[in-house]
Amino acid sequence: MSSLNPRAEGPSSPPPLYAAVSGLKTPPPNGRAGLYNGNSVSPRRAKGEAANQTQCRNIVIYGYCRYQDRGCIFNHDTSNISPSKNPASPGQSGNHINADMSKRKLNVESASFTPGQSPSFGNAVMASPPQSKLSTKALEAAVFTPRMSALSAASPPMSNPPLPPQMNMMDPMMQGASYMQPEIPPFPNLSQSFDGMALDQAALQQNPYEYNPVPPQQHAQVNPYAHQNNPNEVYYAQQSYQPVQYHLYAPIGPHKQNLLSYQRTVHDLFLKDSVREDLQKKAEASLQTLPNSTLPNVDSYHSLVPLDLHVAKSQGKNAPAPPQPTFGYTSWVYKATSTKDGSYYILRRLEGFRLSNEKAIRVVEHWKRVMNANVVTVHDAFTTRTFGDNSIVFVFDYFPLSQTIQDVHFGPNSRYQNRQHANQTQNANTEHMLWSYIVQLASALKTIHAAGLAARVIQPNKILLTNKNRIRINCCSILDVLNFDSGRPLVELQQEDYLAFGRVILAIACNNPHAALNAQKSMDYVSRTYSPELKNFLLYIFNGPASGGPRTMDELLGMISFQLVQNFDSSLHQNDTLETQLGRELENGRLVRLLCKFGFINERPEFAHDRGWSETGDRYLIQLFRDYVFHQVDEAGNPVIDLVHVLSCLNKLDAGTDERIMLVSRDEQNCLIVSFRELKRAIESSFSELQKRG
Ligand SMILES: Nc1ncnc2c1ncn2[C@@H]1O[C@H](COP(=O)(O)OP(=O)(O)OP(=O)(O)O)[C@@H](O)[C@H]1O
């Protein structure tokens, strides 16, 4: 057996426990081409160098070492760190985290950035840059006094309140590791452009905090991956300091057609690109924040981000006037984070509303119990003076990147704009979509009416498209609170729901938001273009049953039963597809957890000289296994990059199979034969020991 150097770094020599086979010269591990390249090992410090002369890495990286007084044996003297390396020295431009931090923090000198919505909502507490231009609506907005007057321009950006405990647990495996609020990324110096696309210099002269929505065309330039239709993504694009790499892992053709049935490409192992991209965009929209925001925390909600950009959009010269407020009050829509559960919600604030009857707001309690997949659930309603006026706030579920039917079908960027002379296929597609909408709205209305309520908000700007062909009625309960004393009978309100339902479907069918104003002409168009079933459905809605009584949901559902079955079938198919995708990611999630454990265990500098940690067989074994999985080289010493090898090793490790592999030390003097079961046990015991020390 070769002599062991207990202090040697890197898994060059085995501890006695696992030195089952030694002295073999570079055997290929597990029958694979697997010579180990010892040259790649770079010891952290020269052999024989005393530990107390070695600069502590924590000092170099973080500027301090939390173990300094708790037994860390490395040198903590900062005087011998060159200024460019010393993270604590201000103004240095080294590659050091702390030095960068001061620059990364957003401050008044941050590079020109035009956030999606002005921080000047309400009273601008922060010192605005001199050329500040406020949007019309912002100027008219009610004054508010933020709770924290410390939110001045000089202060660092508002830090979010701590997340609730459950948010601190990424995974049971990660318990104990403290959650770190991600640093808000620095905003780009726009003059440097995204991906080499230079932006208008004039824009740089503007107030960097001014609300200045990017027009769709320009938006597309800023973020080549942006949806053009969704104004929400104005924030999204502006807040990205570099475009998200949605194309990562994208299966760029030509694709191999001659794969055998058992062969897989890498892309088969991961989530479908379109699904991944969609989810990533939604996650990013959910995580967006408004830097330097002066919006207050409201009740138990913080980090408000305004979403309704209609007012801003209409500020252009030829833009139409802002739409009339739907509820008779100026309304604001904010995405917000709850301090109670860390989830995202929509706060809809109606400005200047004074609650005259306490009972009115209790109506929301009935709505809270309405659970339907096509209704945006309302969670709460409360009055507040936090914005400096009397406002009422309704709390709804948040669906990232959703758009209203109004925007999707009748908005300026609608893809249905030029459908006046649609061909047969387009009409068939439209009818398919219409039936999907009809079935979903009917389902929502059935639940609402069965609960003894009426929706009262079935109109294109209050129906959200939250996914492809997936709609939800938004803003339920608001009119019930606002018009509490109107005393209108429920039956009348419910019958109005049917009419509103018909008007929305007719408008979409005719691709004209005002189709219901000329009902006869519109119905002629429907008869000419779509199936008789659709026409009969609309006739029932508008004229009521032939018997003359009120419309009933059961009767209506009976009329569209064939479509119900078809929609149910499509939805099951979609479920199956998503479940398949989920299965793929399940595998990956499992492996990521394993990799995290590896990362936690391997190469811990603070324990490098702790005999109890670094010199026992387990850690040594894990290091050799890490080399076996990731650092294989071929006969010529070139790295072998084989994802299948990695995945199969990790899967066997996770399952703890009895299959044995041969691990070779880096100095190629020793090798060990060990089963995946033993490796699994070694990783588990090392990880639990690490948790005990943490
Ligand atoms: N529950 C929600 N989840 C996610 N986004 C939402 C939600 N409700 C509204 N939004 C976003 O806010 C935007 C504005 O919503 P709002 O209901 O005010 O529509 P609107 O067309 O502006 O209506 P109005 O004409 O009454 O102002 C929507 O386009 C949508 O992007």
Image: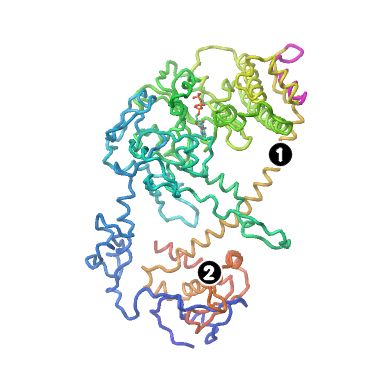
x and y percent of residue 635 in the render? 57, 79
Tell me: is circle 1 under 8 Å from ligand 1: no
Disc 2 residue type (three-letter): Phe
The vertical placement of 16 against 586, above or below, is below
Mark found first going from the N terminus, 2 or 1 = 1
Residue at the disc numbered 2: 630
Instruction: Indicate the secondary structure of the residue bearing disc 1.
Output: helix
The vertical placement of 201 against 175, above or below, is above
Residue 471 visible somewhere in the drawing: yes
Question: Would residue 438 appear left or right of 332 to someone viewing this image?
Answer: right
Determine if the magenta segment contains residue 148: no
x and y percent of residue 355 in the render? 42, 18
The vertical placement of 291 against 510, above or below, is below
Instruction: Indicate the secondary structure of the residue bearing disc 2.
Output: helix
Question: Would residue 550 appear left or right of 476 to someone viewing this image?
Answer: right
The vertical placement of 177 against 429, above or below, is below
Residue at the disc numbered 1: 570
Q: Which mark is drawn over residue 555?
A: none
The stretch of residues the image draws in magenta is: 531-548
Most extreme residue toward the left is 79
Q: Residue at x 60, y 46 (%)?
A: 275
Q: Distance from label 2 to label 1 (Cα)?
A: 43 Å
Q: Nearer the viewer, residue 354 or 266?
A: 266
Question: Would residue 33 appear left or right of 342 to someone viewing this image?
Answer: right
For mark 1, does the 10 Å Cα neighbourhood hold few (<14), some (14 to 19), or many (20 or more) residues?
few
Q: Residue at x 51, y 51 (%)?
A: 245
